[in-house]
Image: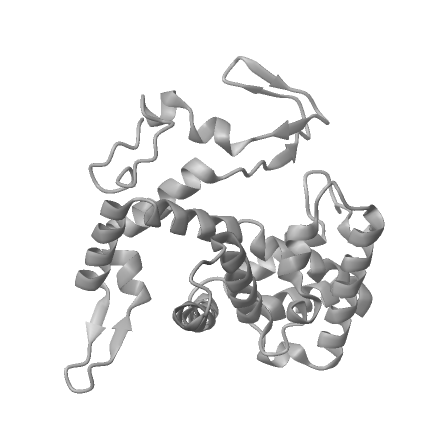
Amino acid sequence: MNLLREEQKGGGGVGIKITHAMNPALLGPGLDLMNEKMISFLKTSVDQLSTAQDSDHDLFSWCRHAITVAATDSAYGKMNPTMETNLDKFLVNIAPNITARKVWNARETLVSAFIDYYNASGLSDASAMANARWREQRCVGATLADTARLEAGMALGLLSNTVPAAFWTVFEICSRPPLLAAIRAELCARALHVDAATGARTVDLADIRDGCELLVSTFQETLRVRSKAMPMRMAYQDVLLNDRYLLKEGGIVQMPSPVFHRNESIWGDEADAFEPRRFMKGGNKGS
């Protein structure tokens, strides 16, 4: 716990240092490599759907497993410790109806897997982000056991938003046939490249980001409508907001995203509606 204590009022502890160390690793080539690894596994997962014997699939279970493996593989490499511990099942089993002992045992299993991972030089094939986190934690005096325990929390952080975002994006698109058709047409026109000689088809991720405005807008609208994030902060001194709201020193500030994302003064009269074109140029973003 001493590692997590703030070095000064308002921040400066190991958490901030690790965050700052991660930032360069999540820009440029480091991020591109993680995305390439994620897409490679996701392609395999999608291809397997067409050969599965069952005609019906649990969409959330499939998204949870596919994103869990893809995200953690891209971060930790071939020796990904989370796969040995069935992290995707661990995530869904954390619920009020189980005992604290089961959760504790699951966490300790994950911590042990990370210790084995580091001892086996798993970082040699890991992302720049995972290596940056390791270096920073060692620089501040974290032991191997400390680092494994801190990294177990990071594994959950990789997935807590990614899995639901993937599920709801697929759900929102596929439950609206006209939208699905429009996005397919957009992808084919702006991101799909066909080799004239071999017939090989390639989807360019940069073209999706820069040219598929409807798909990107739909994703952003999904985050707006479906996000349940609730970041928390502590006030380190008395602060008066907008000459009206006083935040007292030591007070905890909760910021539930649905309150902001459904606010009509921000998003207009149709704040509660799912509008896939809201974030396109000329879309109704509100004020």
The reply to whether residue 211 is in sight is: yes
- Is 127 situated left or right of 263 in this image? right
Q: Position of residue 30 (x, y in %)?
A: 48, 69
Count of numbered circles on the image: 0
Judging depth in this view, the residue of 2 and 7 nearest the camera is 2
Residue at the far bottom: name it: 197
Q: Is residue 271 above or below residue 39?
A: above
- Residue 154 can be seen, yes or no: no
Quarter residue 277 falls in: top left
221 versus 117 height, above or below:
above
Among the 4 quarters of the image, the one containing residue 50 = bottom left
* Residue nearer the viewer, 133 or 255: 255
Residue appearing at x 27%, y 74% in the figure: 202
- Image spot of residue 265 (x, y percent): 37, 20
Q: Residue at (53%, 49%) from the top-left corner?
A: 161
142 relative to 283, above or below: below
The image shows residue 240 at horizontal and vertical percentages of: 58, 18
Residue at x 22%, y 52% (from the top left corner): 181
Q: How is the image coloured?
A: one colour
Which image quarter is the C terminus in? top left
* Relative image position of residue 257 (x, y in whole percent): 51, 33
The residue most toward the top is: 244
For image coordinates 53% across by 70% down, the residue present is 74
Q: Residue furthest front?
A: 54
Q: Is residue 131 left or right of residue 167?
A: right
